[in-house]
Image (tube, grey):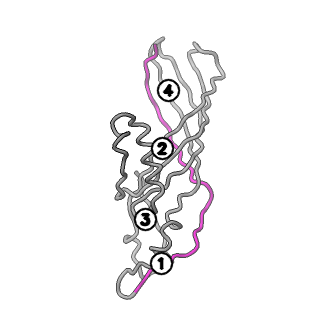
Amino acid sequence: KTSMRVSLENPLIPPDVLRTDAQVRQFHYALLFHPLPNGARLRPYLAIGPGLQLIRLVDSVQSSNSLLKFAFKELNALYSAYRFGGDPPLEGGGIFQPTLHYGGGVKYHVTRRFVIRADYRETLSAQPDFWTKSYTSLVASDIGDGRSIQAGKLEKYGMLRQQRMSLGVGITF
């Protein structure tokens, strides 16, 4: 979860009115490159690959396909995210978009079967666009006291970058 902030140019509307929580769900596939041979005690690696992400407001409810729900859970999650991403984000939908995932890390074999892993990954994607699909409903919205919202031009500032570091333990066979 993350907090989504909206900046307004009109001081008559308190900013807390448009503050809400957002959720980002991601699926990635990474190709790993190991410069050292298999069996080395310390084994660094580089990772790169494509991904998909769904960004939605927490209040939005995602539907699912009843046929895929029980048989193919992973396929159902991707199908539901794709369908959910088609609806306007401010009207109960989400933003479904491709990503690029890259990073690196190191595996250290403490024993032959016990491994400690640390890595850093970054995900790049386009900035989420919450406004364009909801523009017609935003222009028509009345916020009370004879005031209405006038949606301006969408401004995007570069790519959306999400970094994360992780540490894990594993058992090899």
Residue pictured at 46% horizontal, 13% vertical: 173
The verdict on residue 159 being magenta is yes
Residue pictured at 53% horizontal, 33% vertical: 119
The verdict on residue 86 being magenta is no
Read off the magenta span.
147-173
Mark 1 surroundings: few (<14), some (14-19) or many (≥20) residues within 10 A: few
Residue at mark 4: 117
Amino acid type at image mark 4: Arg
Amino acid type at image mark 2: Gln
Please identify the residue farthest to the right as the structure is shown. Answer: 35
Query: How many callouts does the rendering have?
Result: 4
Q: Nearer the viewer, mark 1 or mark 4?
A: 1
Label 1 sits on a secondary structure element that is helix
* Quadrant in the picture for residue 71: top left
Residue at mark 3: 90
Tell me if label 1 and label 4 are in contact, CB under 8 Å: no
Residue at mark 1: 139
Tell me if label 4 and label 3 are in contact, CB under 8 Å: no
Amino acid type at image mark 1: Val
Query: Label 3, label 2: how many angstroms apart (C-alpha)?
Result: 20 Å
Mark 4 or mark 3, earlier in chain: 3
Mark 3 or mark 2, earlier in chain: 2
Mark 1 or mark 3, earlier in chain: 3
| 70, 27: nearer the viewer | 70
